[in-house]
Structure formats: structure tokens, C-alpha cells
Amino acid sequence: MLVRVKFPLQLIGLIAAMLLGVVDAGGTAAAAPASASANENWILLSSNRDGKTRMYSIHEDGLRLSPLYPPGRWLPPVAVSRDGGTIVYGTDPEEYVPKAIFVSRADGSGFHRLIRKGLDPAFSPDGKRLAFTTSSGIWIVGIDGHGLRRLTSGGDLAFDWAPDGKALVFVRSIATNFYGGGRYAIVVKPLRGRAHVLVRTGPNEDDNQELYQPRWSPNGRWIAYFNVEDNRRQNGLTLVRPNGKRRHLVALGRADEEIAEFAWSPDGRWLAFENEAGLNYILPSGKGHKISGHAAGPVVWSPDAKRLAFVVNEAGDIAVAGADGRGLRRLRLGVAARGLMWLPDSSRIAFSGSTGGDPLQVWVVGSDGQGLRRLTNEGTNDVVGRTRLAPVLPPAPPVPATEHVLDARTVTTTSPISALSADGSRVTFAVRPGVTDCEHVVAWAPGSELIRLGNLPAPCPLYGGSITSLALAGSRAAWVSTTFDEDRCGFALMSATLADPTPRDVNVGQIYGGSCESRDIEHLRGDGDLLVFNDNSSHPTWLVQIGVGGRKCGVVFCATLRKGPQASPIDSVSGALIAIRTRTAVSVLDNHGVLVRTFRFTPADVYAARLDGGRLVVARSYTIESYDVATGSQELSRPVPAGYELTDVDDGIAVLRRTDSVILVRLGDGASLRLTPGRAPVLADLEPVGLYYSYATEGSGGRVVFVPRAELLQQLGGGS
């Protein structure tokens, strides 16, 4: 005999609260709203500037960037209430794993855990309640933790609130098939009352209910959704009344293919959507026009419903048009935009975007394209929302620089140095990635300030780059950035100058398998005004000079000096000469790629060839040999200390290196000097002004040091 027991609603809510953990053990509830200024706009953003993605608030003028919760927490923001007063935090959308849901006021006060585990939290229109999903269905709860109850059973997803907050529309799975898809229904469920089905869809092999995207019009008169069936003739953007009547198709295409996104205007009069043909707008009747033939990103409407903005995907430009699609204007800002958000006055747009390869920053610009201003300069940042509430926590301190000048001869870094190249009175070095900054290149002249040749500081992405070679020639530097992904690696050759430190693409390629182990992919070398590399994407390989010529390598001017035999691999550059080395021969070319002389060796054991003015210094199995390039005659031979390799020669002094030390050898008399400054890796480059070297320190830091040549000569015995 089945006995039905009826529990009071209050008791059901109490039991659910205990199971889901609606509030913390202490019963914490949201704090009272902070005061808001009608004349202030604060932009809410997520940033990983300190190594962890967390929520911040920044004034629209770019001042007072403040965290919204104390250090030690890193919760991704999910949504901001319509009035900008409350924020919900939860699962990273890319993970889609049920986790605790937290809420706070938009000023950071009243931060507390609301739900122990849930997904897809969304505010009611008045911001007082939250709907979310679990494996058992859709639930609602007050943001103060009260009133928790389950609204629907399991298998209901992709919901949206009615404008009056009294009902939800969602997608229900009503039958499944072998492939994981099946049949679905668009359902409306009042918070109090019975659910009713608006539409039962045909079969669909895709099990992603999110594709249907049901969304209520802001005026409450229509529900729009994508019909996604195996029968393509019925697929497209569809409208239906909340009572299930007047269903009609307004735009053909599948949500996962032809149509990607749509957005209601704030007054509910217009729908803007993107498809393969570009961006369009329509009335609920289905009448409308194309706004732009360009592929578009997500569409955002101005708060006054008079204009819309979207991203032109091929360039990342922002475009603005009237609500009727007229007056289209493309804002060519030189910034590749991603997320867009109108500010409350409907005259300005906040957005996340990047320029010159920088990580995403937060920007503000007028809807007419005037007054562009960058608000952030650290980390990767995304615009999340806006509020009138000033943050309660103090401003965030600047992220400490990963390197700074210690004294006139020394630079200290928070990570070890991975590459070093000097030319004349200046050195460039690559700093390995740390918690707050990816690997990057820095230029320094002793006694002066540091110049960053690279993008704004930010933690590395998931597959961050590694700088494997670096060369400085005059005021231009170039480096190879390599990314590794299981059995394959990709690489990019970048270049920048002291006058224009933004990195520019020179050559992009991809290699596979064992070739990824090479640390000298492009054979990049430089000296004076001559900066060259081997373009391995060509067959045969080309010898190419960067920064001159009439053709483009990537976005940088370049000139091809030589093709075919004796064009690669480059091993050294000095003055107007280039050395091309193989195990059996070294060919010396001039700065136009013309062969000057070829030196052949038996046995085939040449592992380094360095030019020193008009001399060629060759390292073989056990010796260093010096040759006059003009005559081809050998001048001298010196033994190589065991475990050391030749890395540089300048004015008769050779630099021999192993991982933890450097030896300087004066070739004329054999006088030597050993440097063991610190931990490996130890790098060094000798120039006429002196020696630049680097080493790792305890605590995973690094040092770059300059020693004047006069001091080196004194330690070598005072000879010339």
C-alpha cells in the first residue's frame, strides 16, 4: 500500500537548502546595497593580472582598479544583474562542471556562497532571485539564500526569464536516440503553476540543447528560438507567442552553422542576427534588411534601443548602426575588439580588445569612434558588466615588474634568462615566463632604463610560447617564439625596434616531431645593420635580411640575399660578412649574399663558425682555429677545454661556454679567464665595449651583468 505524505512548502525548502548548501554555515546573507552615484560608471571586468582570474571594478576614466574580493579567492564571474547591483560567480563556462555558486554586491560587499553545486546561474529581471541547473532540474533561490525550490525535473536546460520574472522558458529533452540527440520541447513554466509546451521539435542528432537558445522578448510578447532539426527546411530563427500561438520562421539556417547569434532590442521591437551573409535585423513580422555583409560577432543594443553595435570579425573593428539598420559606421580603431558593452548614457562603448598582439585589455570609445582610451595595461582582461556602485576594497597595487635595474651594471629578473644577444653598447635578453608575465624580450644599455620589446605583461595562455633564439642588430631585435603541443611545435619569428617596440610577425611556420627539439629553428643572427635568418618555408632555403628591401616577410620589410646552395644554415654575422656552416665546410658571404670564400674541413667535425671582423674562427672536435678570410690562410690553433663550446669571438677574444660557466680565451697568447657567476643557465656575449652575461639565481630569479672591456683585459693580464 502506497502512502502519500504531503510536506509543507517551508519544510521542503529547508531540506533543499540543507542539501544544496544555500548559505554558509554561519548563515551569511548579502549585505545591504552600497550607495550608488548617478554620475559614476564603473566597469566590471575579469582579469588574470596577478596570475589568477578574478573580478575587478574600474572607473570609466581608468582610475581605481579594485578587486571585488580579497586575495586567496579566484572565482570567474558568470553574470551581472540587470540593474548592475549584484554579481554571481561560479563555474568557468569552458569547464562546465557543477561548482559552488557565490554572489556579492557589485561593489564587492556581502560576498558569500549561495549554492554548494550548480550550473548556469542567471538573475531574474529584478535581480532578487537566481535560477540555476543541477542534474535534478532547474532551481530558483533568492540572492539572500531564502526561498530555494526546484522548479522543474532533470533534463531541462537552456532557460531564460520572462521580463516580469514570473516564468521561465527552457528546453526539455523528451526523447533520446542512439546518437545522444533526440526530440526536444520548448516549455514555459510559471514560478507558480503548471508548465505548458509551446513547441515539440522534430528529431535532432545533436544533443546540445543550448543550440535552441530560447529568449523572451523584453516586452514579453514573443519568445525567439532556433529550430534545429534534421529537416533543414524547418530550421532557423523562429518566433512564437508565450501561449504557443502564431509560431513562424523569420530567418532560415541552423544555429550551429548558418546562424550563430541573435539579440533582442531593449524595447522588444527588433531582432538582430548574424548568418553567413552578414548581420541582419528584422521585425517580429519577419520583415527586415541586411545591416552589414561582413561576418559579425555578438550584437549588443544600446540601452536607449536606438542603436546596436557588433564586431566585424575579419578585422575586429567595431561597427555601429541605427535600430533600423541605417547609418552603419565602421569604427577603425586599430584594436581587435571582442566583448562589447554599451555604457548607460548610450554614447560610449566599453570593450575588451587587443592591439599589436597584446593580451586583451579594457577600452572605452565613443559611438562615433572618438575618445578611444585604454583603461588597463596588465593581464588578460574581459568586460563583464557595469555598475553605479563604487568598490569597497582599496585599489589593487601595480603588479611588480618581472625585471628592474639593480645598479648601473646589473639587471635583476624574477625568472631565469633563456636567451641573450648583445650588439655594441646594448643587450637584449629573454625572460622566462613567471606567474604574472609570459616570456618576453627586454633591451638594456648599462646606466639606462629598460625597454620592453614585446606585449603588455600577462600570464601565459595554456600553450604559452618559449623564446628559443634571439638576435640584436643595431636598434632592431628579432626572436623565435616556439609553442609545443604534444608531438608537434609551431614557431613564429618576431621583430621589433627600439623606436617601435611592438612585435611584428616576420615568418610563421610549423614543424613536427623530432625537429621540435632544435633550439635554432630559423638560424637567426645579427650584427650592426645586418639582421638575417633562414626562411625554411622556402625550397630551397633562403637567406633573408630583415628590415630592408621591397618585399614583405609577414608585416616586416625584408630582402632575399641568396637562395639554394650556401644559403643556409647561418652560423655567424660580423660587420658585412655572413658565415654559412655545415659539418664539412664554412662559406663566407658578403652582405649582398655574394660568396667571398669557402673553407673545407676534414674530418667533418665543424660545430661552430664565428666571424670576428675579417677573421673566421672555427671550433672543431678539440681545437679552435682562426683563418684570414681575405687570404684563406690559417693564423693559429688553440685547444678547447673539455665540456665547453665556442659561442662568440670579438677582437681576438673567444667566449667558451658550458651550462654553468664561461671561459674567455685571448687567442693571441692563450690567456684565459673563467666566470662562474651563479646557477645554470649561464649565457654570454662579448662586444667591443665589454662582456654581457646572465645567470640564474636562487629562488628562480636571474641576473644580467655588464663588465667593461678594460676590466676584462686587466683580469686577462693587461694585454691587447
Image: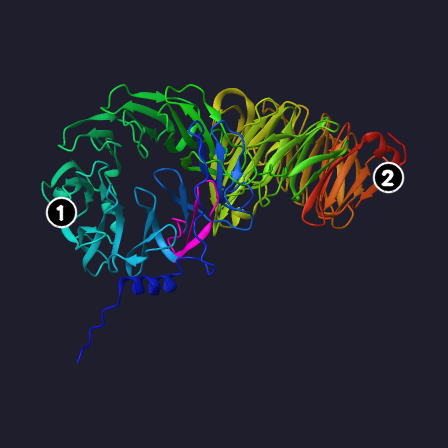
Residue 614: give x, y in percent of width and height: 73, 26
Q: Of label 2 and label 1, which has the lower sequence position? A: 1
Tell me the quarter of the image containing the N terminus: bottom left
Count of numbered badges drawn on the protein: 2
- Seen in the image, is 680 located left or right of residue 259? right
Amino acid type at circle 1 is Asn
The answer to whether residue 564 is visible is yes
Look at the image and say whether residue 270 sits in the magenta stretch: no
Given residues 502 and 142, the one toward you in this image is: 142
Q: Callout 1: helix, strand or loop?
A: loop
Look at the image and say whether residue 99 sits in the magenta stretch: yes
- Between the residue at mark 2 and the residue at mark 1, the CA separation in whole angstroms equals 85 Å
Residue 586: give x, y in percent of width and height: 65, 35
Few, some or many residues within 10 Å of mark 1 (<14, 14–19, 20+): few
Tell me the quarter of the image containing the C terminus: top right
- Seen in the image, is 109 located left or right of residue 223? right
Residue 474: give x, y in percent of width and height: 65, 24
- Work out whether 110 lies above or below 45: below
Residue bearing the label numbered 1 = 231
Q: Are marks 2 and 1 in contact (CB under 8 Å)?
A: no
Q: Callout 2: helix, strand or loop?
A: loop
Labelled disc at residue 671 = 2
Given residues 26 and 445, the one toward you in this image is: 26
The residue stretch that appears in magenta: 91-116
- Seen in the image, is 119 located left or right of residue 40? left
Amino acid type at circle 2 is Ala
